[in-house]
Image (tube, rainbow, N blue to C red):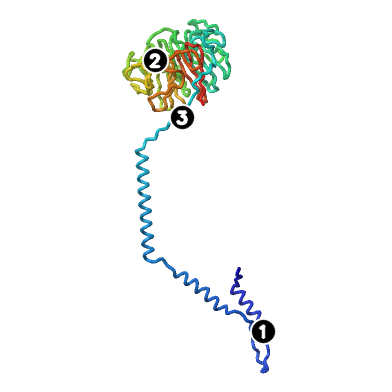
Amino acid sequence: MMNWIYPSKILEQNHSNFLTVSSHNHQKVQIRDAWPNWTSIHDDHHRYKKKRNKKKCSYPCIIKSIIIGLLLLIISAILLVVLLTRSKNQTITINRTAVLRWNTTGETIAGVVGQFGNASNQLNVPFGLTMDWSNTLYIADWSNHRVQKYLRNSSFGQTVAGQATGSYNTTSSFLYYPGDVAVDWNSNVYVADTFNNRIQLWTNGSSSGMTVAGTGSIGNGSNELARPYALTRDPNTGTLYISDTFNNRVMCYLSGALSGSIVAGGLGSGTNNTQLSSPFGIYFDSLSNSLIIANGNANNIVRWTLGASSWTLLAGNANGMSGNTSTEFNIPMDVTLDPMGNMYVVERLNHRIQFFPMGETIGTTIAGLTGISGSNSMLLNQPMSVTLDSQLNLYVADTFNSRIQKFVRY
């Protein structure tokens, strides 16, 4: 490795190596040591730099660089146009069913298959289901005239409305064929007391109910109901929406109101988009401010935006025809949505649960077998209701097997 000597140090060495001697003529002569010619070296160094700096790109080289740059710019522009055009014209299909899957073998979590009884571990033709924030399950136990509450992982229910013995009456401490149940954040339950033609509120721990809609007598007035089979509730406002089945309409009752207003149907039974035909299960979709309605005898699921005068078809046949294909229904009894907007439909006479990804009209069977009823773990017998827990596990009221089946999501 070469050790460079900087000029400053060279000068210091030159000065320190001067020798002064006296000649015979007494003249002082300065003698230097034999140093190299540093001036020559310094000049050579700068001469090299000058030669290097003089190297410049030739004219043909400049032309080539410009041409290459233009070609790269043109290619980049073409690629950008192709990508933008493809993104506008290309339809991307997301397969949500690949993400949401359920075990097709059900697990009985309430009731005993084939046993119709009123013991705390039995059910008698269960109808409506709902799940609260803690994954506690509430069941409208139709022929036992009561509402049962099942804590998570418990196989025994607690009676929270009606009589545990299964007796019925028209007084405030009884129910008469309850079709559905809703629950608020304080565990108060709202019951569609179907054959008493009223909605009863049972506060948490109460032994009797309070009428919040209907009069107890069948009718079609603004304060009357006719066999209300289902209900749903806006958790933010406390507004109740009631499926007034025999009146072919949905009623809205504001919190504390003594009478309601028609928000869907009410123009007789029919398949016109301004009519309903025996509406059963309903779901309030707060995101779209609309009701999703299981339009039972019309064999379709419709969306009725609040304030609108007609519905839009979500699934099934607009003309009311029944069927058993993936786009048809045979008496849809209940409907619910998950947080992603996917739809779940209970079909009574097709003995199945159909799953519809958001915005799609073709369903996939996720519980039961189409058109086949039975009591084994893979079959259903005229199911009436469906609900989901926080993990999107599926709970089905397997009504004529008198049990609740859980289908685990995996």
Q: CA distance from mark 3 to mark 2?
A: 28 Å
For residue 38, above or below residue 345: below
Residue 242 appears in the rendering: no
Report the mark closest to the observer, 3 or 1.
3
Crowding at dot 1, Cα within 10 Å, few <14 / some 14-19 / many 20+, comes out as few
Q: Which quarter of the image is occupied by the N terminus?
A: bottom right
Residue 349 lies, in percent from the top left, at 41, 14
- Quadrant hosting residue 187: top right
Q: Amino acid at mark 3?
A: Ala
Label drawn at residue 331: 2
Q: Nearer the viewer, residue 227 or 98?
A: 98
For residue 95, above or below residue 237: below
- Quadrant hosting residue 241: top left
Which of the two labelled residues, at mark 3 and mark 2, occupies the earlier sequence position?
A: 3
Which of the two labelled residues, at mark 1 and mark 2, occupies the earlier sequence position?
A: 1
- State how many labels appear: 3
Report the mark closest to the observer, 3 or 2.
3
Q: Amino acid at mark 2?
A: Ile
Crowding at dot 3, Cα within 10 Å, few <14 / some 14-19 / many 20+, comes out as few
Q: Residue at x 62, y 74 (%)?
A: 9
- Pointers 3 and 1 in contact (C-beta within 8 Å): no
Q: Secondary structure at mark 3?
A: helix
Residue 156 lies, in percent from the top left, at 58, 13
- Pointers 3 and 2 in contact (C-beta within 8 Å): no
Label drawn at residue 357: none
Crowding at dot 2, Cα within 10 Å, few <14 / some 14-19 / many 20+, comes out as many
Q: Amino acid at mark 1?
A: Leu
Identify the residue under disc 1. 19
Q: Secondary structure at mark 1?
A: strand
Which of the two labelled residues, at mark 3 and mark 1, occupies the earlier sequence position?
A: 1
Label drawn at residue 98: 3
